[in-house]
Amino acid sequence: MFSLSEENYLKAIFHLERNYKGGVSTNALAEEMETKASSVTDMVKKLSEKNLVKYKKYQGVKLSKAGRKTALEVIRKHRLWEYFLVEKLNFSWDEVHDVAEELEHIKSDKLITELDKFLEYPRRDPHGDPIPDAQGNFVQTSKVLLSACKKSDLGKIVGVKDSSAAFLQYLDKLDIGLGSILEVRHIEDFDQSIELEVDSNTITLSHKTASNLYIQLE
Amino acid sequence: MFSLSEENYLKAIFHLERNYKGGVSTNALAEEMETKASSVTDMVKKLSEKNLVKYKKYQGVKLSKAGRKTALEVIRKHRLWEYFLVEKLNFSWDEVHDVAEELEHIKSDKLITELDKFLEYPRRDPHGDPIPDAQGNFVQTSKVLLSACKKSDLGKIVGVKDSSAAFLQYLDKLDIGLGSILEVRHIEDFDQSIELEVDSNTITLSHKTASNLYIQLE
DNA sequence: ATTTATTTTTAGGTAAATCTAAAAAATTAG
DNA sequence: CTAATTTTTTAGATTTACCTAAAAATAAAT
């Protein structure tokens, strides 16, 4: 099987591929992995030899079929564990990430199959992200960033882009979260701040905040 | 905190201290860890510098207070996870060990506190071993090896010394396990094989098998 | 009490994953 | 289209946890 480090690289490449269509750059991967570009080059070479990624010098890196499969397995495990922590062990959504980072590397097919069954096959993790099934399939519902919405748009919060504890706790303080129904009341020209009606309250979010909230439009 | 390897050494020393009262020998630890004596010496030096063990060259090794505390924390985690796997995820008692070996190293106080609560504070793991509480306290009920029993002794199986899958599956095949009530009917002089009555059946166990079953006498 | 055998330690080396510093390639700018 | 800048790769070290082989200490046997 694969080392902890290899699995983490595959996961990071998977996430970055969304924004780097032509191949994930060494620097981007270095930033995501909180390491140096030279370390990335080394690891990418290793992954390439194992046929987990497609890599040509100076051309960035892409997951191979096998690499994508492994990445999705790790992501499946991560999200199932997050769901377990929130639903069964009283964790809040801002506490689960670091523990799931460790749990996702436990190697046992039976463990994850049975955990999935025990949790009754959840479709989404506590941050609204879809949980891939055992074959790596997952639904990606259409969602847009709140920052891309226009005045009078109606929608529901279905995900967060930033799932750091700091951001999630801020949302808790604002009393908004997954499932909150909102209407865009006004967008301020000057700073793109956005005024919403949520549960018959009016709140104003900064552009930065709005650009970390995913909305499913009505 | 401590590395995976350090935690495993502490656990191994804890288990071996039962039989090596004057200090665990390098070779015994090497065998338990499935490594070479020279590697053990290296690691023991490191643990000694971190004040997790007391060590003098050629004199074997003992856990310090801090080392014992850490060992018990790891053992607590191992046994709670084993209980979880059997009670919640349909694992059988011969399937849990390897997965628990990985899970026991997950670092999160909240995780283990909440898991313990979720499981309703179990006292024993699936092999009959006591689960230490958060302070490292655990009950050690008086038990003897079946191989040390005499004719006409009455008792109950309360634990296994060897918890390898092979042995546990053999017990399943014999249809005996934790809780089985038995009476010693005969001990064969020639090979120490032991004849038992269990659930109104008569079975004969080899000395080797008998020396891996813990009995609580009536 | 020496010699022999066993155990333990030391010395030197390896593989994985990281690092720094310098060289090479690619990109951007004038 | 060169020149400057940025990105990426190479080269050489470091750390952790191992290893083998040889030396040193302890234990056992004659």
Image (cartoon, coloured by chain):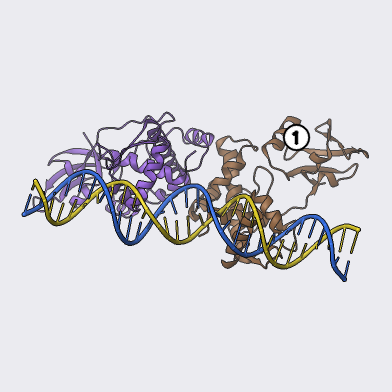
Chain colours: A brown, B purple, C yellow, D blue
Describe residue A27's horizontal placement relative to residue A187 as left or right: left
Describe residue A91's horizontal placement relative to residue A111 as left or right: right
Residue B100 x/y as whole percent: 43, 46
User: Mark 1 = which residue?
Assistant: A176
- Against A184, is B39 above or below? below
Residue found at x 72% / y 62%:
A23
Which of A170 and A185 lies nearest the eye of the viewer? A170
Which of B172 and A72 lies nearest the eye of the viewer? A72
Mark 1 Cα shell of 10 Å, populated few (<14), some (14-19), many (≥20): some
Q: How many marks?
A: 1
Residue A117 x/y as whole percent: 54, 50
Residue found at x 79% / y 39%:
A209
Which of A206 and B38 lies nearest the eye of the viewer? B38
Residue found at x 73% / y 45%:
A161
Residue B21 x/y as whole percent: 25, 36
Whether residue A159 can be seen here:
yes
Whether residue B90 can be seen here:
no
Q: Secondary structure at mark 1?
A: loop
On what subunit does the disc labeled 1 rest?
Answer: A
- Against B168, is A178 above or below? above
- Against B46, is A113 above or below? below
Which of B37 and B77 lies nearest the eye of the viewer? B37
Describe residue A71's horizontal placement relative to residue B137 as left or right: right
Residue B4 x/y as whole percent: 46, 45
Q: Amino acid at mark 1?
A: Ile
Q: Quadrant of residue D7?
A: bottom right
The residue lying furthest to the right in this view is A189
